[in-house]
Amino acid sequence: MRRSACLALCLVAPLAACGGGEDPGDDEHYDCSMETRDDDFAIGLEKVSPSGTHFIMMSSVPAPPGRGDNHFVVHVADSAAAPMAGANLTVRPFMPDHGHGTAIPVVITESTTVVGEYDLNPVNFHMPGLWQVLISAGSATEANTAVFAFCVPG
């Protein structure tokens, strides 16, 4: 009996982490009209890291970003606005309300035709809610990281 209770708890606990409680949404329903922490999506949306690196959203499919796989193209420039070739990007989708990311790694491909442009695909948002996309150039420290925030309705 004790083993089955433990097994039941082990199976239910991961599900509880992604829904209910103090979380503003659940796994299937999320009202983005009530979300105030997300960015107003637009092509050309720019974020600047504390160290001065500029990240500009050049394209998104779908636009605005949605549930499932997203395909972004970002332009990366240094603090003097010079395009950065070989920027060694790190991209991490993260759900701050749930404390998790996604198991699907982001493939980062540097453009061979446009200096400073990077293809990020897939950027997976597997459930509704607020998602952050943390992008770092060079070392993935807070100083080198900018955060895009998107609400995925459910």
Image (cartoon, rainbow, N blue to C red):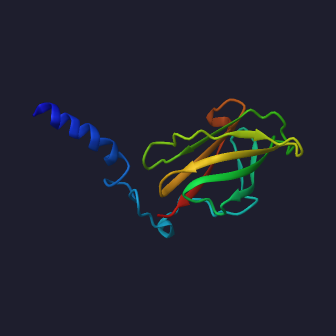
Q: Is residue 151 left or right of residue 47?
A: left
Q: Is residue 16 left or right of residue 137?
A: left
Q: Quadrant of the N terminus?
A: top left
Q: Which residue is drawn at the image coordinates 27% and 44% (left, top)?
A: 12
- Residue 94, position in %: x, y? 53, 45
Residue 86 vertical position relative to residue 59 in the rendered view, above or below: above
Q: Is residue 8 left or right of residue 1?
A: right
- Residue 108, position in %: x, y? 71, 39
Q: Residue furthest bottom?
A: 33
The quadrant holding residue 115 is: top right
Q: Which residue is drawn at the image coordinates 59% and 38% (left, top)?
A: 105
Residue 73 vertical position relative to residue 85 in the rendered view, above or below: below
The quadrant holding residue 136 is: top right
Q: Which residue is drawn at the image coordinates 37% and 54% (left, top)?
A: 23
Q: Viewer-proximal residue, 81 or 11?
A: 11
The quadrant holding residue 90 is: top right
